[in-house]
Image (cartoon, helix red, strand yellow):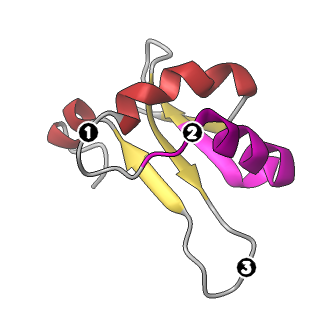
Amino acid sequence: MANFRRFRPDDLNKLSKCNLDPLTETYELGFYLQYHAKWPSLFQVAEDQNGNIIGYSEQTPYAGNRGAASNGITDRLQSWAN
């Protein structure tokens, strides 16, 4: 089971599991910190029962724009993203 909570800056290094695959567009670390500074309530992470980040979601406050969501390949195979 996954637990969803707000992103914290100390989560930044834990996102790599979700970003290190060819299907995910990644940004430099400053992008994620800037996003968190602007919209902290719209940036969430999903953790497994061991506290590992298995996914994240970045929503956007603008109508008509989609945010981003990603999860690690092992968690995709376990159907966490369905």
Residue beneath disc 1: 21
Q: Which amino acid does label 1 sit on?
A: Asp
Predominant secondary structure in magenta?
helix
Q: Give the range drawn in magenta.
A: 26-45
Identified at 69% across, 85% down, the residue is: 63
- The mark closer to the camera, 2 or 1, is 2
Q: What residue type is labelled 2?
A: Glu
> Callout 3: few (<14), some (14-19), or many (20+) C-alpha neighbours within 10 Å?
few
| Mark number displayed over residue 43 | none
Judge left or right: residue 10 versus residue 3. Answer: right
Location of residue 54 (image quadrant): top left
11 versus 65 height, above or below? above
Q: What element carries label 1?
A: loop
| Residue 13 percent location from the top left of the image | 55, 20
> Callout 2: few (<14), some (14-19), or many (20+) C-alpha neighbours within 10 Å?
few
CB within 8 Å, label 2 to label 3: no
| Residue 11 percent location from the top left of the image | 62, 23
- The mark closer to the camera, 3 or 1, is 1
Instruction: Check residue 38 for magenta coloring.
Output: yes
Residue beneath disc 2: 28
N-terminal of the two: label 2 or label 3? 2
Residue beneath disc 3: 62
Identified at 31% across, 35% down, the residue is: 72
Looking at the image, which is closer to me, 79 or 10? 10
Location of residue 39 (image quadrant): bottom right
Identified at 30% across, 43% down, the residue is: 80
CB within 8 Å, label 3 to label 1: no
Q: In whole angstroms, how far apart are the C-alphas of marks 2 and 3?
A: 22 Å
